[in-house]
Image (cartoon, rainbow, N blue to C red):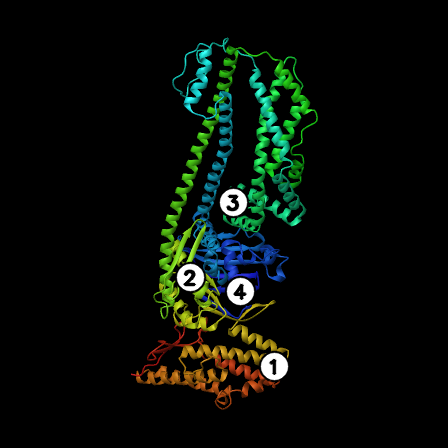
């Protein structure tokens, strides 16, 4: 991956113009909430990805990168808002500059722009999880199994696994559903074949007996077995197979069947079951909320069944398929009660609808006789009833809209005017037909049975094919699910072990035997942790918020270690450890340094103690941090550095605001005194609350510097370095003069005197005070051009060896020969 060298941020978010030199090393940014830390994180993310994640997601409606990415004063000129990021690209072993402007965020200027470099930068842009805040880390710990699977799946780029699983499940369900109508068709064809053969039970013996009886009448050979190629019309010549199109007894049997079905259809209208069902549906129709839910449930169910790719099936908006599916399922959950009610009503309607289907089918056969009679019989009333029945069947099966269903039920049992007269006339005409001969009846029987047999064979073949397809799709879905689960189990076992190792590392004092379980399931990822040997529980059950923070970080690091391995060279952690106690923060520093020595961490925090831990544990090197003291809309973040502080103090004095200048000077001196005491290993009286005043810090720092310069003089004399001895004597004398000029001795008798009196001074009286402290603080720093770093003692522990600076220009030996 990458390491960041430098960043320049211009008119972006809350920053006007800021340049930071990361030097490809881990770096920390500290400051109270609201001082601009996260603006730097946003800038890095924007430069690398063209996006700012905190401007999207839940609760950000109406917020956009183009409108709200620029500084508030530059929002009408997004071309002014830009980030210039210099990175070292590990794979190419070279520096690359990425310049991205808010106005044209999708088209950064990358220099150099070879194909390999552009490809590498694009790959980084596809992994925005290099930058995480606490709210994002904690989702890995405290989310539901479904949400955790989604979050971690996105991190591991497993979305397609779930997408393919969903597609295979949809195919399997679709194939399973496709069998149902074919099964019904096969059963209907079977019933019609049985009816045409005049038997009650379908068996080889019964079929052979019925067919052979008719073939015997025609003088044809009898069948001894049935096979797939057998025809009931075998050996019957074409002219011999001709038979009347209407067989009187058969046709009259159809008339009686229609009369029976029609009677049931009409009587059902007044049955208790039908009336109760009709009343429930009318009540449902009068409840607007229930009706709305019913409509939405149907809509969402349909939408869910239509998802095929990463687009909404309704509006074509690009969305991750897992996110879309989860959203639809969560909304459907609201309608569970209504859905159960609807399914119950539909189940009750099924019986009535099936009867309509039987009557409709019988009527179609009967209507065909009217057209075969000579003269032809008018069957308009038959056609009207057939159409009416089909419309009712469709409305009842659809259920929604309820208005159509209610109309269909209101007309249930109704028979069109003139139908009964037409049925009677058809029966009269059929009775006038001559009785068929045994030969004609046998031919008609065999011809009709053969037609029904062919229909049955065709739908049976279709059903068999559908059944085989369903078996294959079900098996594919099953094998895919088992394979994915197995692979995920192995993956999560590796991550689990690494997570346990990291968490034990930072909690070795009280949870050295800690363990955890990551359990993969279908679209879910369970996460349980051990609680002091008492069992496995959700992380939120017994562990404190601080421990949960630690778990989130450890799980994230374990995942990134698995995903990237040696390529995990850059990571931004934005105030991720808000509630971890100070003891464990030190261990976190050790974890990051020891377990990820090749990773450049950029960390933000509002806690200076946490910052000090980063320094003392060597996670960040000297000078690899910024400390923001405030933020304002005009200037952006203000750092605790000489340039910012002294300039601001002068600006207050220019308008005679001594109180503001005195307050800022006091706060800066407290800050810089603490830094100097640490670097010089000055002895400060211990305070358990760590609330040290200026009187606690500055005098020890000054005394320590005087003593160190004195050690330097003695050391140079002991080594016979006369010129160095004289030079150090002058330096020590100058420093003593600066101490006197600042009247620092008075701090020993009254630590509050200066501060209490400063605000009462006039501008002309306070300027010399400011100058005296400015010169004094400057004397603690290297005077070499381009350095200006604070002097510090090495080593940090044990016997003092040298007083030096970052550039090496100052190097005062403290060891006496």
Q: Nearer the viewer, residue 685 or 530?
A: 530
- Label 4 crowding class (10 Å Cα cut-off): few <14, some 14-19, many 20+? some
The local secondary structure at tag 1 comes to helix
Q: Earlier in the sequence, mark 2 or mark 1?
A: 2
Toward the right, the furthest residue is 417
Callout 4 touching callout 2 (CB < 8 Å): no
Q: Point out the tag, 1 or 3, that comes first from the N-terminus.
A: 3
- Return the residue at label 3: 310
Q: Height in image: 217 above or below 18? A: above
| Disc number lying in front (2 or 1) | 2
**Residue position for label 4:** 18
Q: Which residue is identified by label 1?
A: 658
Distance from Cα at disc 2 to Cα at disc 1 = 59 Å
Q: Earlier in the sequence, mark 4 or mark 2?
A: 4
Residue 787 seen anywhere in this rendered image of the structure: no
Disc assigned to residue 537: 2
Mark closer to the observer (1, 3): 3
* Residue 317 coordinates in the image, percent (x, y): 57, 46
Q: CA distance from mark 4 to mark 2?
A: 46 Å
Tell me which label, 4 or 1, sits earlier in the chain: 4
For the residues marked 1 and 3, what is the alpha-carbon distance in whole angstroms? 63 Å
For the residue pair 697 and 171, the one nearer the viewer reads as 171
Mark 2 and mark 1 in contact? Answer it, CB < 8 Å: no
**Real-space CA distance between mark 4 and mark 1, rounded to the nearest whole angstrom:** 28 Å
Viewport quadrant of the C terminus: bottom left
- In the image, 729 versus 614, the foreground residue is 614
Q: Are marks 4 and 1 in contact (CB under 8 Å)?
A: no
The image quadrant that residue 757 belongs to is bottom right
Residue 498 location (% of width, % of height) = 36, 59
């Amino acid at each position: 991956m990458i390491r960041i060298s430098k960043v320049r941020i211009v008119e972006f978010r809350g920053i006007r113009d800021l340049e930071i030199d990361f030097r490809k090393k881990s770096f920390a940014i500290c400051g109270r909430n609201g001082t601009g830390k996260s603006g730097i994180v946003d800038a890095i993310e924007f430069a690398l990805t063209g996006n700012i994640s905190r401007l999207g997601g839940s609760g950000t409606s109406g917020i956009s990168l183009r409108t709200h990415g620029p500084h508030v004063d530059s929002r009408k000129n997004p071309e002014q808002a830009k980030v210039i990021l210099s990175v070292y690209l590990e794979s190419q072993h070279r520096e690359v500059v990425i310049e991205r402007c808010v106005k044209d965020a999708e088209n950064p200027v990358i220099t150099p722009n070879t194909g390999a470099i552009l490809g590498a930068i694009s790959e980084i842009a596809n992994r925005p999880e290099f930058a995480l805040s606490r709210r994002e880390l904690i989702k890995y710990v405290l989310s539901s199994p479904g949400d955790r699977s989604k979050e971690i799946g996105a991190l591991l780029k497993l979305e397609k696994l779930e997408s393919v699983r969903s597609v295979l499940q949809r195919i399997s369900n679709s194939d399973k559903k496709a069998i149902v109508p074919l099964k019904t068709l096969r059963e209907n064809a079977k019933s019609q074949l049985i009816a045409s053969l005049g038997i009650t039970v379908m068996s080889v013996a019964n079929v052979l007996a019925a067919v052979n009886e008719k073939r015997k009448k025609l003088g044809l050979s009898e069948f001894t077995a049935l096979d797939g190629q057998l025809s009931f019309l075998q050996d019957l010549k074409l002219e011999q197979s001709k038979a009347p199109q209407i067989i009187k007894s058969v046709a009259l049997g159809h008339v009686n069947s229609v009369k029976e079905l029609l009677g049931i259809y009409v009587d059902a209208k007044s049955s208790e079951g039908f009336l109760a069902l009709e009343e429930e549906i009318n009540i449902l129709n009068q409840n607007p909320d229930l009706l709305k839910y019913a409509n939405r449930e149907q809509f969402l169910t349909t939408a869910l069944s239509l998802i095929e790719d990463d687009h909404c099936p309704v509006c074509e908006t690009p969305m991750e398929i897992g996110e879309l599916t989860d959203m639809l399922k969560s909304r459907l959950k609201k309608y569970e009660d209504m859905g159960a009610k609807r399914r119950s009503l539909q189940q009750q309607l099924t019986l009535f609808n099936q009867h309509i289907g039987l009557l409709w089918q019988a009527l179609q056969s009967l209507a065909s006789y009217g057209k075969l009679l000579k003269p032809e019989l008018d069957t308009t009333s038959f056609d009207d009833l057939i159409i009416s029945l089909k419309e009712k069947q469709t409305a009842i099966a659809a259920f929604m809209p309820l208005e159509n269903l209610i109309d269909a039920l209101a007309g249930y049992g109704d028979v069109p005017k003139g139908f009964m007269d037409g049925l009677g006339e058809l029966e009269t005409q059929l009775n006038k037909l001559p009785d068929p001969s045994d030969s004609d009846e046998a031919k008609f029987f065999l011809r009709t049975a053969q037609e029904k047999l062919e229909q049955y064979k065709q739908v049976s073949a279709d059903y068999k094919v559908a059944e085989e397809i369903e078996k294959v799709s079900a098996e594919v879905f099953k094998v895919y699910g088992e394979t994915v689960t197995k692979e995920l189990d192995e993956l999560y076992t590796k991550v689990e072990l690494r997570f346990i190792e990291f968490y034990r590392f930072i909690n070795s004092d009280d949870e050295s035997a800690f363990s955890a379980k990551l359990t993969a399931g279908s679209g879910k990822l369970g996460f349980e942790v051990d609680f002091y040997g008492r069992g496995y529980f959700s992380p939120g059950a017994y562990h404190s918020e601080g421990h949960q923070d630690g778990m989130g970080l450890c799980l994230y690091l374990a995942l990134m270690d698995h995903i990237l391995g040696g390529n995990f060279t850059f990571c931004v952690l934005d105030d991720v450890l808000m509630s971890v106690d100070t003891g464990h923060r030190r261990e976190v520093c050790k974890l990051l340094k020891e377990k990820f020595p090749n990773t450049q961490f950029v960390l933000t925090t509002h806690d200076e103690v946490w910052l000090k831990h980063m320094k003392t544990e060597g996670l960040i090197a000297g000078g690899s941090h910024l400390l923001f003291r405030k933020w304002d809309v005009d200037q952006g973040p203000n750092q605790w550095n000489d340039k910012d502080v002294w300039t601001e103090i002068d600006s207050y004095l220019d308008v005679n605001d001594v109180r503001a200048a005195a307050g800022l000077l006091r706060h800066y001196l407290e800050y810089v005194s603490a830094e100097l005491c640490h670097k010089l290993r000055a002895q400060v009286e211990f305070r358990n609350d760590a609330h040290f005043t200026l009187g606690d810090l500055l005098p020890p720092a000054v005394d320590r510097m005087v003593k160190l310069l004195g050690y330097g003089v003695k050391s140079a004399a002991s080594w016979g370095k006369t010129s160095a001895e004289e030079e150090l004597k002058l330096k020590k004398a100058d420093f003593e003069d600066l101490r006197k000029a600042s009247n620092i001795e008075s701090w020993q008798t009254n630590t509050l005197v200066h501060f209490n009196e400063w605000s009462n001074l006039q501008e002309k009286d306070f300027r010399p005070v400011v100058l005296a402290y400015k010169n004094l603080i400057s004397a603690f720093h290297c005077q070499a051009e381009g350095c200006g770093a604070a002097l510090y003692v090495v080593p940090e522990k044990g016997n003092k060896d040298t007083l030096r600076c970052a550039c090496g220009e100052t190097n005062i030996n403290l060891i006496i020969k």
